[in-house]
Image: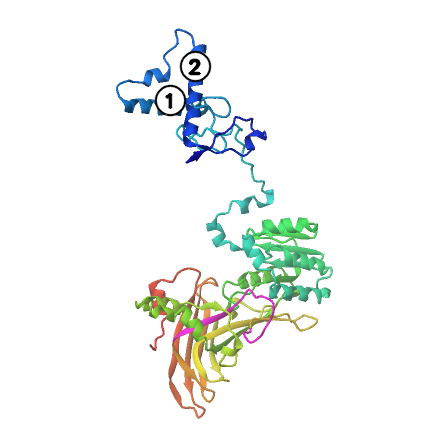
Amino acid sequence: MSAYINKTATCGSGAGRCKQKPISLSAFHEQLEKAENEMSVNKAKSAPAASLPTVRALTSSPTSKTNKQVNTLHTKAHDIPIGNGSTMPEAVVSDSLRGGRRGRRHCSHRGRSCPRLLTPTREVPHELQKVDRMTSSDFRHDFAAHLENMRTRQKDQEHMRFFQLAMQENRHLFAGKTVLILACGTGTLALMAVRAGAKMVFALDHSQVTDYARLVVQANKMEHVVKVLHGRVEDVKLPQRVDGIVCNWMGQCLLYESELLELIQARDRWLKPEGFILPDLGALYLLAGAEHLLKNERCDWWLDVYGFNMNALRRYALAEPRFARTTGERVLTSAEQVLCLDLRTASREDLHIDRKIQLTVHQDGYCECFVLYFDVSFSRAHLPLQLSCNPCLNTSLKSLWYQTLLFVEQPFIMRTKSIYTGRLIFRPWPSFQRMKIHVELTAGSADGIQWSPLVHKSWLLTSRFQTVAEVAQCQDLLN
């Protein structure tokens, strides 16, 4: 065994940082005893005659060898000199040494005598004080204010290129006009509108992301053109009507968690009669797919979990729509348009879907799910411009939106010679934060002979866990 001796050095000097020479443990104890003896002699010479007995005299007892060993250890623990020239008791009652462990028993003779440094304080811009105080629970209800969300919603995103091209190629709609950017986010679309020639831009959002938007606008020196407003449409007053509204209003499967109601309300309050909405046309489509691999991964996996039957959890998995990417190779039917929106005239009632459907099969296969996707476009564009989530399209850019997959409980075969008709219900339940989808499908032959129904099932879109009663309502009534 070996130990190290720390040479006494002033804090910050090069002597204390030099490499220490290892010595044996026995030599270490010899030097320790020598240092104690020298200290005892020095104290005896300097102490007055009427002074109290030393700690060694008070604690020593010649009764046993064990006591002598204990007293020796006690003296070592109390009289060992440390680097700053003080004895151990003096170091213990003083401020704790920076970098060392606190307490008498844990103090080291190698402790440093540097004073403790104050922890530097964080400097948060005044504009971000509210965001800085947000907790994880706050971000759960306002994820738009999270910095990582801002990055993923803009980096290499297809919809950002769509808005950029729409403004660049249609400058005649923005030049000298007043524009409202609804759900403005970090303010990127507002800056694009200014670049396209807008005279005044109102950037409105009910999220705390507006704190970041103000900083972005100031950094680009456009605060005299862009006015960032925080709040909802019903709570905000604009000083004038606007010539156009730009809004990324789309949600998953077009309607779920969308900004449609806010957009319709803003249109009725502030948009001029000849004003534009970007984008203003939207369409929702339904088709059938053969996603057996994804279904096995998300749903059927619960049928055998380490030898146990967990079909009760499979019921939950089948009751919830899945947002995933599928490809054209897994599509069995042509797309059936189930919703067509013109936001210049649309009302709340137009957002409820209850209609008949007919699917035309173009390749035989087992149907594992129904697929919902949407397209949006700008009708007043100088050149045709569309943003699509069609699974048959390939693009190098990312998309915020996935296809919505509705898995069926039992797969069924679809043939090109058959005709498949049914019904689709898709409506808020009771708002766009919770929506219910219901599909009925029946197969028939070309001569009009009807077969037995294939699907009679519901799915529930919600941001929280479903209850047992809600899951029971979503099960296929034919199984």
Prevalent SS, magenta region: loop
State which quadrant residue 418 falls in. bottom left
Task: Identify whether 42 is placed above or below 284.
Answer: above
Is 59 inside the magenta-drawn segment? no
Q: Earlier in the sequence, mark 2 or mark 1?
A: 2
x then y, percent, for residue 143: 51, 55
x then y, percent, for residue 38: 44, 18
Q: Is residue 11 left or right of residue 89?
A: right
Q: Is there any visible trace of residue 206 in the rendered image?
A: no
Closer to the camera in the image, 335 or 416? 416
Assign a secondary structure to mark 1.
helix
Closer to the camera in the image, 51 or 172? 51
Q: Image point 33% across, 22% down: which residue?
A: 71
Provide the residue span drawn in magenta: 390-409
Q: Image point 60% across, 57% down: which residue?
A: 184
Q: Considering the image in quadrants, where does the C terminus appear?
A: bottom left
| CA neighbours of label 2 inside 10 A, class few (<14), some (14 to 19), many (20+) | few
The label shown at residue 41 is 2
Name the kind of residue labelled 1 in the image: Thr
Task: Identify whether 95 is placed above or below 45.
Answer: below
Q: Is residue 164 left or right of residue 432?
A: right
x then y, percent, for residue 169: 71, 67
State which quadrant residue 29 falls in. top left
Is 391 inside the magenta-drawn segment? yes
